[in-house]
C-alpha cells in the first residue's frame, strides 16, 4: 500500500512545528519537575497545560484534514474519507 501524504502550506506547517516544539519543551519541563521532586499539584497543572496544547494541535490538523483531504475526496465522489474522519473524531472525544 502506498504511503499517503498531505501537503500543508508553509504557514500551517510552521505553526504546527512551533506548537509541537512548545509541547516538547513543556514535557521536558514536567520531566525535570518530577526529577526535582516538585509538588504534585504544580506538575498536574503543567500536564493539563500540555494536554490543552496537544488538543489545540489536534484541532488544527483535523481542521486542515476536513477542509482539504476530506473536501477533495468528496468532490471526487470518494466517500471513504467520511468513514475515516468519523473514526478520527471518535478517537479525540
Image (tube, rainbow, N blue to C red):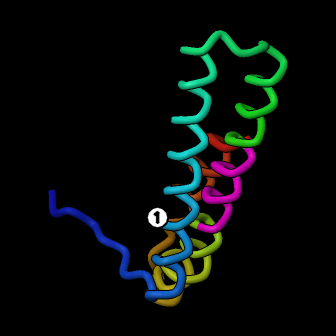
Q: How many marks?
A: 1
Q: Residue furthest left?
A: 1
- Residue sitting nearer the eye, 90 or 60: 60
Q: Residue at x 67, y 44 (%)?
A: 92
Image check: 56 left or right of 76? right
SS of the residue at dot 1? helix
Residue farthest front in this picture: 36
Q: Quadrant of residue 93?
A: top right
Q: Residue at x 50, y 46 (%)?
A: 24
Q: In the figure, is residue 76 to the left or right of 91? A: left
The answer to whether residue 42 is above or below residue 64 is: above
Q: Is residue 16 left or right of residue 45?
A: left
Measured as percent of width and height from the top left, residue 38 is found at 71, 15
Where residue 70 sits: x, y (%)?
Answer: 53, 75
Other-residue count near label 1 (Cα within 10 Å), few / some / many at <14 / 14–19 / ≥20:
few
Q: Report the residue marked by disc 1.
A: 80
Instruction: Name the quadrant of the N terminus.
Output: bottom left
- Span shown in magenta: 52-60
Residue at image coords 48%, 77%? 14
Residue 35 at what x, y percent from top left?
A: 54, 14
Give the x, y percent position of residue 49: 76, 42
Q: Which residue, as the protein is rendered here, is positioned at the far top?
A: 37
- Residue 82 is a magenta residue: no
Amino acid at each position: 500500500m502506498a504511503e499517503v501524504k498531505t501537503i500543508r502550506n508553509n504557514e500551517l506547517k510552521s505553526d504546527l512545528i512551533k506548537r509541537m516544539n512548545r509541547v516538547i519543551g513543556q514535557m521536558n519541563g514536567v520531566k525535570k519537575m518530577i526529577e526535582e521532586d516538585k509538588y504534585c499539584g504544580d506538575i498536574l497543572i503543567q500536564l493539563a497545560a500540555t494536554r490543552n496544547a496537544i488538543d489545540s494541535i489536534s484541532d488544527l490538523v483535523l481542521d486542515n484534514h476536513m477542509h482539504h483531504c476530506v473536501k477533495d475526496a468528496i468532490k471526487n465522489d470518494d466517500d471513504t474519507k467520511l468513514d475515516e474522519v468519523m473514526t478520527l473524531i471518535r478517537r479525540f472525544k
